[in-house]
């Protein structure tokens, strides 16, 4: 039986976050489901009466977070587990062709939003000597690829921040894990990244069996049931059909100044 009762999941209206909420609610947890699209959260909550509480928030609105958490109903207020899952990638262009606006949105969502949620919730975990922070990183944080520029860099931040949190929570029972998935299908991630271009999205997953949202949800459930003395620091996962590409070499490279 897990040590934890109440879980707050960010990015709960789609993809991994929605699957995590469903799996945890099915397995007896109380879940606060947070995202921007309230109607999606509401239908998720309706499927699990009394077990899932919908909370509409843009995690970039950092100054709203403390009051919003304070407004939670009593039975959902004491957060034992924070799953920092809300995040996005925008575009696959090389850095020299990217818009600053997209970079800013990724930094504010994947980094600032995650920090603000952690900043609001971690102190009470330390005070109660009970808590678990699970952050969603990505293989993109470790393995660079063309077009990954700021997205990959935000996920590298998430991994290093998670490791640093392990240092700062030393001496307490609070756990921290970063999950770093590779290619995943059946989420909105690539639709958001590629501006809803269905053809491009489908070509990414063509003839693959990629990671599914339920794989991530079952991983989170497993983490929450690990013994109190055990902390899993990082979990990197890829589908069997994906692996490392190796380093690239450009031949006949033109080094003349123009
Ligand atoms: N899918 C992959 O291939 C993959 C691989 C590795 C890592 N990841 C990471 O895993 C996490 C979940 O990805 P996913 O595939 O499940 O993506 P998804 O299906 O697009 O879901 C993203 C979720 O984040 C929420 N969100 C986005 N911006 C937000 C904001 N400003 N405030 C609050 N919520 C926000 C979205 O809800 P609203 O739009 O309703 O706010 C949605 O619920 C992300 O951090 C992603 O970077 C994904």
Image (cartoon, rainbow, N blue to C red):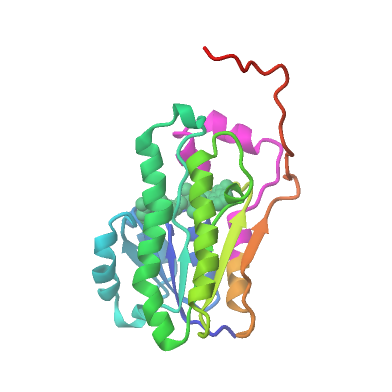
Residue 121 lies in what quarter of the image? Answer: bottom left
Q: How far across and down, in percent of the image, does residue 44 sit?
A: 42, 62
Judged from this view, the residue extending furthest toward the bottom is 128
Q: Which residue is pictured at 64% across the width and 63% down the height?
A: 235
- Any magenta on residue 212? yes
> The N terminus lies in which quarter of the figure?
bottom right
- Position of residue 142 in the picture relative to residue 6 (left or right): right
* Quarter where residue 48 is shown: bottom left
Q: Residue 11, how many percent across, how many down?
A: 43, 57
On screen, residue 101 versus residue 209, left or right, reads: left
Give the magenta range: 189-217
Q: Percent position (x, y) of residue 182?
A: 63, 49
Residue at position x 47%, y 35% in the image: 91
Examine the rendered structure and indicate whether residue 168 appears above or below residue 185. Answer: below
Residue at image position (63%, 85%) is 229
Q: Is residue 189 above or below residue 248?
A: below
Whether 186 is drawn above or below 113: the answer is: above
- Asked whether the viewer can see residue 214, the reply is no
Q: Main secondary structure of the magenta part?
A: helix
Image point (45%, 52%), residue name:
87
Q: Farthest top residue?
A: 258
User: Residue 193, can we see it?
Assistant: yes
């Amino acid at each position: 039986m897990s040590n934890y009762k109440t879980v707050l999941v960010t990015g709960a209206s789609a993809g991994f976050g929605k699957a995590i909420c469903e799996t945890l609610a099915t397995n007896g947890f109380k879940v606060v489901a947070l995202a921007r699209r309230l109607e999606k959260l509401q239908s998720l909550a309706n499927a699990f009466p009394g077990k899932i509480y919908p909370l509409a928030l843009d995690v970039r609105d950092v100054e709203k977070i403390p009051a919003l958490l304070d407004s939670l109903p009593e039975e959902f207020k004491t957060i034992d587990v924070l799953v920092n899952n809300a995040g996005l990638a925008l575009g696959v262009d090389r850095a020299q062709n990217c818009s600053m606006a997209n970079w800013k949105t990724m930094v504010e969502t994947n980094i600032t939003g995650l920090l603000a949620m952690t900043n609001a919730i971690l102190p009470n975990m330390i005070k109660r000597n009970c808590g678990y922070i699970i952050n969603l990183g990505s293989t993109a944080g470790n393995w660079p690829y063309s077009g990954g520029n700021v997205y990959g860099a935000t996920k590298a931040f998430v991994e290093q921040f998670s490791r640093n949190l392990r240092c700062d929570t030393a001496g307490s029972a609070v756990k921290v894990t970063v999950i770093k998935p590779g290619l995943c299908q059946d989420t909105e991630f690539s639709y958001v990244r590629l501006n809803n271009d269905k053809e491009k999205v489908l070509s990414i997953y063509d003839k693959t069996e990629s990671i599914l949202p339920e794989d991530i949800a079952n991983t989170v459930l497993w983490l929450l049931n690990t013994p109190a003395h055990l902390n899993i620091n990082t979990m990197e996962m890829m589908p069997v059909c994906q692996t490392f590409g190796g380093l690239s070499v450009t031949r006949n490279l033109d080094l003349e100044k123009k």
